[in-house]
Image (cartoon, rainbow, N blue to C red):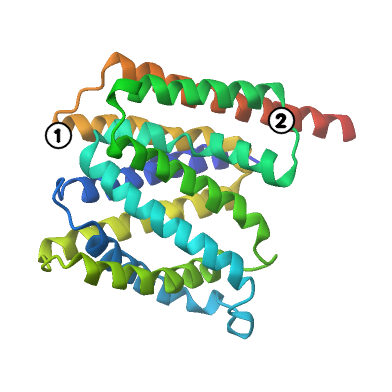
Amino acid sequence: MSGKTVNSAILLLILGNGMAMLSDLCVKMQGEDVAVFQFVAVRLVIMLLLLLPFIKKVDFENFWEGGRIQFVRAHVCYAGICCMVVALSTLPLATANAIFYAAPLFVVVLTVLFFRESLSKSSLLAVVSGFIGILVILRPLDVSWSAISAIGVAFSLAICATLVRKLPKGQSTVHSMLVSQIMMIPIAIVLAIWEGASFDTDTLYYAFGSAVFISLYNASVFMSYKWVSPQQVTSAEYTGMIWAILLGILFFDEVPDAWLLAGSSLIILPLLGIAYLERKRKHFGQLAVS
């Protein structure tokens, strides 16, 4: 794999993370009075429409294969999206995203609990450091529903990532996403109606922007990981924190404090260390068999 290809993949991921932060920006710009269930319902419908051009990648003969796992993932994902809207609309952009980055830590814990995987010393250190980082960012005296929602986002991301291993092998990403969107829409519509908020056209614009930008992020991840091994470029995923800080300063005058920077470091740096060690281990493994 050429260095040029790796560099291109890293650049694409950096730009993709910028797109993800623009998606978050569309959510946050609605303010704290956002009709959460209405916004999520509109966004899901738009996401479903954006998937239609890729319908050829869907296996309609086995459309509902793995339906039980898909059903669980879909509703956990829906809860996570609702938590995301609450967290982004009430917390500083960088603060919310710093907590979102704790998702890999929850993945480690879940794989140990449910798949009986062994926990290496480096992973244990990352988990402990990450949870301390969350406490540093939130500080126990400042814990609120906004903070709990942010943690809920990280936890839901971890559950969905863990359950991917239970999905049918060979099922395409588009297939999985389409089934998930379809399963989420009924509860989304029911809760939006129950919420009873009058429809605001701004919701449509922001939901459209959020859906498009997050789709561009997903495309950047798919293309980058198709070009190179994830271990070679995964560190670029954490540049989203830089985007979050920049956009927070530019649009909301949210200057990060020392607590946020320290807590973010405790969450992200150990994860980068694990990625480096894994890349190094695979490199020496390849040398041993060559």
Quadrant including the C terminus: top right
Between discs 2 and 1, the one toward the N terminus: 2
In-image side of 239 versus 10 (left or right): left
Q: CA distance from mark 2 to mark 1?
A: 40 Å
Residue drawn at the location 37% of the way across and 74% of the way down: 186
Q: Amino acid at mark 1?
A: Phe
Give the number of callouts: 2
Q: Nearer the viewer, residue 224 or 256?
A: 256
Residue drawn at the location 33% of the way across and 68% of the way down: 188
Residue drawn at the location 38% of the way across and 19% of the way down: 136
Name the residue that disc number 2 marks: 119
Q: Is residue 248 above or below residue 17?
A: above
* Secondary structure at numbered mark 1: helix
In-image side of 29 versus 68 (left or right): left
Residue drawn at the location 39% of the way across and 42% of the way down: 17
Q: Is residue 259 above or below residue 286?
A: above
Name the residue that disc number 1 marks: 252
Residue 16: image location, x then y, percent: 39, 46
Q: Is residue 264 above or below residue 106?
A: above
